Image (cartoon, grey):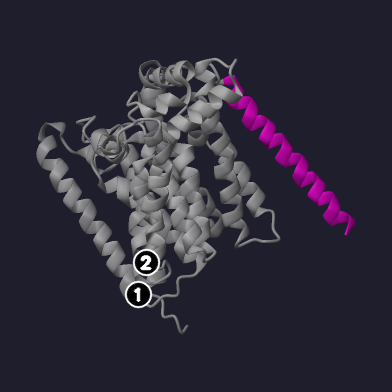
């Protein structure tokens, strides 16, 4: 008993050190400025500073209003903080929310072990997690946390909470839809009742209401993502996807073909899960969700390097569930962090086509594991 108590104290001490280290690393990055801050987020933050909550009722930002709500809240809680630090605060807070949900996911398999603590600490210091918030000040940890919550609630059989978390994520970023194939497959397998899917648009609409009351037209709120889709015209915005190998000169043709390919592969994935007799146990649900989060952006054109963020974080939990496939997490984190280099530091450490192969290895490994589980005889 005494040894167990001393072990808990040691674990708490180490955990505290990692938390302090994670915060110090982010603090050291606090003044790092990117072109996204100069051209976009600094303008949005200036709007909420000048106009208060009324700024959420304008089209000053091409992000959805919930992100502006967070900037407004930050401006009120930390009024004296410089804008470049202020826009990073919500993302850093949600870094630790992501870590918490990974802890909870891993604890489902190891309720008495130290693995959940190690997984939590791994998320806090993961390169893409640190860079995304501490350097870039991006919002990926916010919707990423909602997706991790969705996975956790799916694994624990709480479908209503899962779809509510999905709806919240969707109100932040459209990239939440990368997990839609898994959610659809689980609906067809009756793990997710149909009525709970109705919570997704309901939560999204509720999230838009404050901005609507502040004066933003309903049609603008309903078409934010449609407007975003036409912003860039590149097969890949330095994302390590299939399109790193294809010529930009055939953009118009390849974009259409790529959409058809992505929908077809998602359809095949859904059909395979639907037709399988395998019992949808928590570890299989985790695999399905991770596969969906890697597969969807990999086969879709016009992806950004940051769009693998949810897969990066969930792959850490996956590594604890399937230790022999730890390389999946290593591959995802390496590919994503390497792809960040061009935007953050104006250098390409590894050629993008090579990084896409690294992601393809992770994708194949996860897909092979899913296929084996789906084809396993449930009576054995």
- Which numbered disc covers residue 276? 1
Give the residue drawn at x 64%, y 53%.
115
Q: Residues within 10 Å of mark 2 (few under 14, many from 20)?
A: some
Callout 2: SS: helix
User: How far across and how far down the image is residue 2, in percent?
Assistant: 89, 55
- In this picture, is 90 found above or below 52? below
The residue that label 2 is drawn on is 194
Q: In which quarter of the image is residue 343?
A: top left
Image: magenta residue range: 1-28
Q: Do the residues labelled 2 and 1 touch (CB within 8 Å)?
A: no
Give the residue drawn at x 35%, y 74%.
276
Callout 1: SS: loop
- In this picture, is 315 found above or below 273? above
| Res 321 visible | yes
Q: How far apart are marks 2 and 1 (CA)?
A: 20 Å
Give the residue drawn at x 33%, y 31%.
216
- In this picture, is 207 found above or below 88? below
- Judge whether residue 15 is colored magenta: yes
For the N terminus, the image quarter is bottom right
Q: How many labels does the image show?
A: 2
Q: Residues within 10 Å of mark 1 (few under 14, many from 20)?
A: some
| Res 369 visible | no
User: How far across and how far down the image is residue 246, in percent?
Assistant: 18, 38
- Judge whether residue 272 is colored magenta: no
């Amino acid at each position: 008993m005494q040894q167990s108590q001393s072990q808990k104290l040691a674990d708490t001490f180490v955990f505290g050190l990692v938390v302090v280290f994670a915060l110090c690393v982010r603090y050291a990055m606090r003044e790092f400025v990117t072109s996204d801050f100069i051209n976009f987020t600094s303008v949005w933050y200036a709007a909420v500073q000048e106009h208060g909550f009324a700024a959420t009722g304008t089209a000053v930002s091409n992000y959805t209003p919930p992100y502006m709500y967070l900037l407004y809240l930050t401006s009120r809680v930390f009024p004296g903080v410089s804008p470049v630090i202020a826009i990073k605060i919500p993302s850093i807070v949600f870094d630790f929310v992501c870590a918490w949900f990974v802890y909870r996911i891993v604890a489902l398999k190891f309720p008495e072990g130290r693995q959940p603590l190690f997984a939590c600490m791994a998320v806090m210091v993961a390169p893409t997690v640190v860079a995304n918030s501490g350097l870039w000040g991006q919002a990926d940890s916010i919707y990423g946390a909602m997706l991790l919550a969705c996975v956790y609630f799916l694994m624990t059989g709480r479908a209503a909470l899962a779809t509510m978390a999905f709806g919240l994520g969707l109100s932040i970023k459209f990239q939440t839809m990368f997990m839609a194939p898994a959610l659809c497959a689980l609906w067809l397998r009756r793990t997710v009742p149909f009525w709970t899917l109705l919570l997704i648009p309901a939560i999204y609409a509720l999230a838009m209401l404050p901005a609507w009351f502040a004066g933003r037209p309903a049609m603008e709120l309903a078409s934010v993502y449609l407007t975003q889709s036409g912003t860039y015209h590149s097969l890949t915005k330095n994302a390590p996807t299939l399109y790193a190998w294809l010529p930009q000169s055939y953009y118009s043709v390849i974009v259409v073909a790529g959409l058809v390919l992505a929908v077809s592969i998602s359809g095949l994935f859904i059909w395979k899960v639907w037709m399988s007799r395998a019992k949808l146990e928590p570890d299989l649900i985790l695999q399905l969700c991770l596969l969906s989060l890697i597969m969807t952006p990999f086969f879709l054109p016009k992806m950004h390097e940051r769009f693998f963020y949810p897969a990066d974080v969930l792959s850490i939990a996956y590594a604890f569930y399937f230790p022999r496939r730890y390389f999946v997490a290593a591959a995802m984190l390496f590919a994503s962090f390497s792809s960040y280099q061009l935007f953050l530091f104006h250098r390409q450490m590894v050629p993008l086509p090579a990084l896409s192969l690294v992601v393809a290895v992770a994708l194949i490994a996860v897909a092979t594991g899913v296929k084996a589980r789906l084809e396993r005889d449930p009576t054995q």
